[in-house]
Image: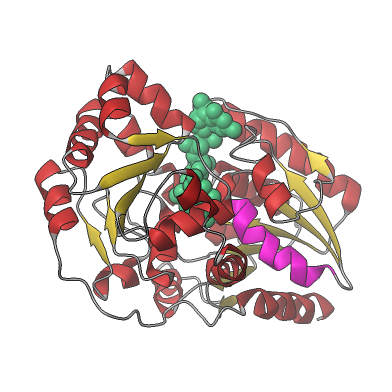
Amino acid sequence: MKIVSVVGARPQFVKAFVVSRRLEPGHEEVLVHTGQHYSDDLSAVFFEELSIPDPDYNLGVGSDTHGRQTAAMIEGIEAILLEESPACILLYGDTNSTLAGAIAASKLDVPIAHVEAGLRSHDRSMPEEINRVLTDHVSDLLFAPSDLAKTMLEEEGITDGVHVVGDVGYDAIRWARGRAAGRGEILERRSLEGGEYVLGTIHRPKNTDTPSRLAAIVDALADAPRRVVVPLHPRTETALREYGLWEDAKRDLEIIDPVGYLDFVELLEGAERVVTDSGGVQKEAFYLETPCITLREETEWQETVDCGWNRLVGADRAAILEALRSTSWPRSAPSFYGDGHTAERIVAILEDAIDR
Ligand code: UD1
Ligand code: UDP
């Protein structure tokens, strides 16, 4: 079968490569990179490390307003779908690249398969929440990572084509652990001792685009009981500079460029805890049994909160510090998101559905 897969942003390269490896024998995958992420450390490094072949198409849309960026992607993806006539389009997660693929394919009646269906934060001010909801409502095959995600879909009246398959991110972590284990490279390079530092990632618009929130986060991290290493997303650097917080952040935190996936997994596994507003990092922390402090008021990975591994603290300085100092975290992590064989399951369901 011929499948068009659409990726565009960092987390999508990580999700897509595990499925691509399973599709490779016997199927034709046409890989489309929208170009939403284009900096080497947000894009090229993942293609190299994860041995992802060069995309068949790169739309090179770059950064822009949401409307213009999404529109440019829709136009580009539509032309590719007309050219390639695939059996289906495969979409990942919740970025503007996901939504663009969903709109282009739904208008052409190309069947849509959505990996990470049913995730909900219930915060419609998040661009990702809009992207998820709209994509799920036009999808034909919905690959939900958990029973809770399936329930979320049911609550919106979506029951056909839903399959609980687990999380492709867990497949990726298992793959990466095998490779990252024992490398110790990034810890050595940065003179970091396992268990002796806090890892931080910040890039959600609610935090980067609200000066008081970003200031409170930087302020709390500056008082953390351990060294704080922050591989910084470019939008956060821009915001810190704009709000006059850059000098404080540079002085009090160990700010580094974004790192590749293998280095990131190593940093996350070695961290005493992680402070993040990322979606993907919350459940990666859970898989690696690193306590997670989430700089948001809600999460789409609610199971990690319910079992005690993840604490939602928003951008409240006191709550962040309390969580950083807390010693009560669970001892072991239950399994909510599959067994690490999600990609195989997705490919088998795709084969079956397309044959029919
Ligand atoms: C996007 C996704 C978000 C995802 C994140 C992963 C949407 C709406 N947002 O957010 O869901 O969590 O990717 O990291 O799809 N920039 C660069 N180099 C790049 C790309 C961006 O410097 O390669 C800078 C630009 O200044 C740009 C800003 O980062 O304006 C934001 O980029 P954008 O792709 O719009 O959103 P992200 O915040 O990366
Ligand atoms: N990640 C990475 N390097 C970094 C930060 C994150 O490789 O410096 C990986 C991380 O392991 C996860 C993904 O990028 O797989 C998460 O991306 P991000 O936090 O940008 O997006 P989100 O998951 O919030 O959409």
Residue bounds of the magenta highlight? 12-24
Is 214 part of what is drawn in magenta? no
Residue at image coords 27%, 49%: 296
Vertical side of 351 occupied by 104: above or below: above
Taking the image as shown, residue 22 lies to the left or right of residue 120, namely right
Quadrant in which the C terminus is drawn: bottom right
Viewer can see residue 131 = no
Taking the image as shown, residue 240 lies to the left or right of residue 313, namely right
Front residue of 344/156: it is 344
Taking the image as shown, residue 330 lies to the left or right of residue 284, namely left
Is 16 part of what is drawn in magenta? yes
Where is residue 35 drawn, in percent x and y?
A: 68, 36
Q: Give the quadrant of residue 328.
A: bottom left
Residue at image coords 57%, 60%: 183
Front residue of 80/211: it is 211
Residue at image coords 18%, 34%: 219
Where is residue 122 drawn, in percent x and y?
A: 33, 56
Where is residue 291 drawn, in percent x and y?
A: 29, 64
Residue at image coords 56%, 76%: 162
Looking at the rendered structure, the number of numbered marks drawn on it comes to: 0
| Magenta span main SS | helix
Front residue of 108/310: it is 310
Viewer can see residue 39 = yes
Taking the image as shown, residue 299 lies to the left or right of residue 99, namely left
Where is residue 176 drawn, in percent x and y?
A: 59, 65
